[in-house]
């Protein structure tokens, strides 16, 4: 990706292998909805070539605890 197209406060990270069943955007959207409703976490998940990716971004209102909570929620779904 050219530097001119990089978003300095945003990253897309491959989901851990235990979330590999999120292989379609519909399944990923259901997972995002579940995280939002049950865990009060809002984090987009998208799918490229059958592989799920999490998009995280840093904003002025985010705290370290927000990212720790996201980690803990993702670990909760470990199979």
Image (tube, rainbow, N blue to C red):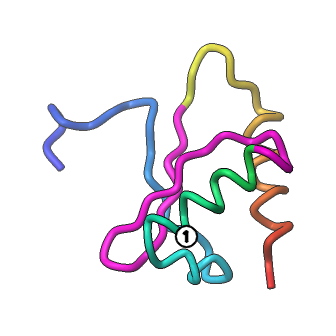
| Magenta highlight on residue 49 | yes
Q: Quadrant for residue 6, please give it.
A: top left
Q: What is the tally of numbered marks visible in this picture?
A: 1
Residue 53 lies left or right of residue 37; in this view the side is left
Expressed as whole percent of the image width and height from the top left, the position of residue 55 reads 49, 48
**Segment tinted magenta in the rendering:** 37-57
| Magenta highlight on residue 54 | yes
Residue 5 lies left or right of residue 24; in this view the side is left
Residue 37 lies left or right of residue 6; in this view the side is right
Expressed as whole percent of the image width and height from the top left, the position of residue 24 reads 44, 73
Examine the rendered structure and indicate whether residue 54 appears above or below residue 67.
Answer: below
What residue do we see at 56% from left, 29% from top? Answer: 58
Q: Residues within 10 Å of mark 1 (few under 14, many from 20)?
A: some
What residue do we see at 54% from left, 64% from top? Answer: 28
Q: Quadrant for residue 43, please give it.
A: top right
Q: Give 31 or 59, whichever is nearer the viewer.
A: 31
Q: Give 40 or 17, whichever is nearer the viewer.
A: 40
Expressed as whole percent of the image width and height from the top left, the position of residue 75 reads 81, 67
The residue under label 1 is 27
Q: Quadrant for residue 15, please give it.
A: bottom right
């Amino acid at each position: 990706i050219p530097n001119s197209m990089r978003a300095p406060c945003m990253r897309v990270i491959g989901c851990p292998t235990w979330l590999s069943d999120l292989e379609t955007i519909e399944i990923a959207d259901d997972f995002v909805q579940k995280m939002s409703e049950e865990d009060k976490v809002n984090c987009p998940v998208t799918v490229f070539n059958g592989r799920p990716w999490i998009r995280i971004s840093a904003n002025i209102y985010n705290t370290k605890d927000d990212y720790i909570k996201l980690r803990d929620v993702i670990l909760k779904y470990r199979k």
